[in-house]
């Protein structure tokens, strides 16, 4: 089961298993939008806050931020508001 606010694993599997030649223009656009949104959500959520299944799903889909800082943490650090000096 995927974390709240993330694309479900079933949707990801369906999108990747259906050949592009069989997808309509609308499906192509939808897949691209959902993929970008899910990738952004993956980057925004720190690894430490992800469920085990979400970490595994991100790794399989190539959507993993590999223990790197979240976008929010990077922004805080850049503004001097984070834990880094």
Image (cartoon, rainbow, N blue to C red):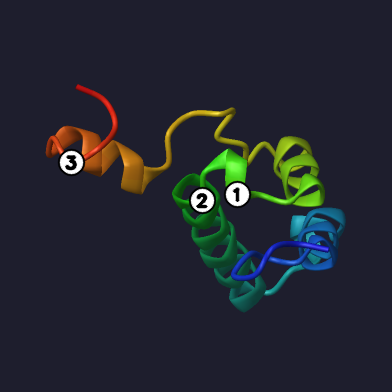
Query: Which sits earlier in the primary sequence, circle 3 or circle 1?
Result: 1
Q: Position of residue 82 (x, y in %)?
A: 25, 37
- Residue appearing at x 45%, y 51% in the figure: 44
Q: Quadrant of residue 64?
A: top right
Relative height, residue 23 to residue 48 (above, below): below
Left or right: where does residue 57 sit relative to residue 67? right
Residue position marked by numbered label 1 in the rendering: 49
* Label 3 secondary element: loop
Whether residue 85 is situated above or below residue 43 in the rendered picture: above
Q: Secondary structure at mark 2?
A: loop
Task: State yes or no: discs 2 and 1 in contact (Cβ < 8 Å).
Answer: yes
83 lies left or right of 23: left
Instruction: Check disc 3 and report the residue beneath it.
Output: 81
Instruction: List x then y, in percent, for residue 13.
Output: 84, 58
Badge 1 element: helix
The reply to whether callout 3 and callout 1 are in contact (CB within 8 Å) is no
Q: Residues within 10 Å of mark 2 (few under 14, many from 20)?
A: some
Give the residue at x 69% y 63%: 3
Left or right of 5: which side holds 61?
Answer: right
Q: Which residue is mark 2?
A: 45
- Marks 3 and 1 sit apart, C-alpha to C-alpha, by 20 Å
Residue 20 in the image, given as x and y percentages of width and height = 74, 57
> How many numbered dots are placed on residues in this image?
3
Badge 1 local density, few (<14 within 10 Å), some, or many (20+)? few
Rendered image: mark on residue 11? none
Q: Nearer the viewer, residue 25 or 13?
A: 13
Taking 3 as reference, is 66 left or right? left
Q: CA distance from mark 2 to mark 1?
A: 7 Å
């Amino acid at each position: 089961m995927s974390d709240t606010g993330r694309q479900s694993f079933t949707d990801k599997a369906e999108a990747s298993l259906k050949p592009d030649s069989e997808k309509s223009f609308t499906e192509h656009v939808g897949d691209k939008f959902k993929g970008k949104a899910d990738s952004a959500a993956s980057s925004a959520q720190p690894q430490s806050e992800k469920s085990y299944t979400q970490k595994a799903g991100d790794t399989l889909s190539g959507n993993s931020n590999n223990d790197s800082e979240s976008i929010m943490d990077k922004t805080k650090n850049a503004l001097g508001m984070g834990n880094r000096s």
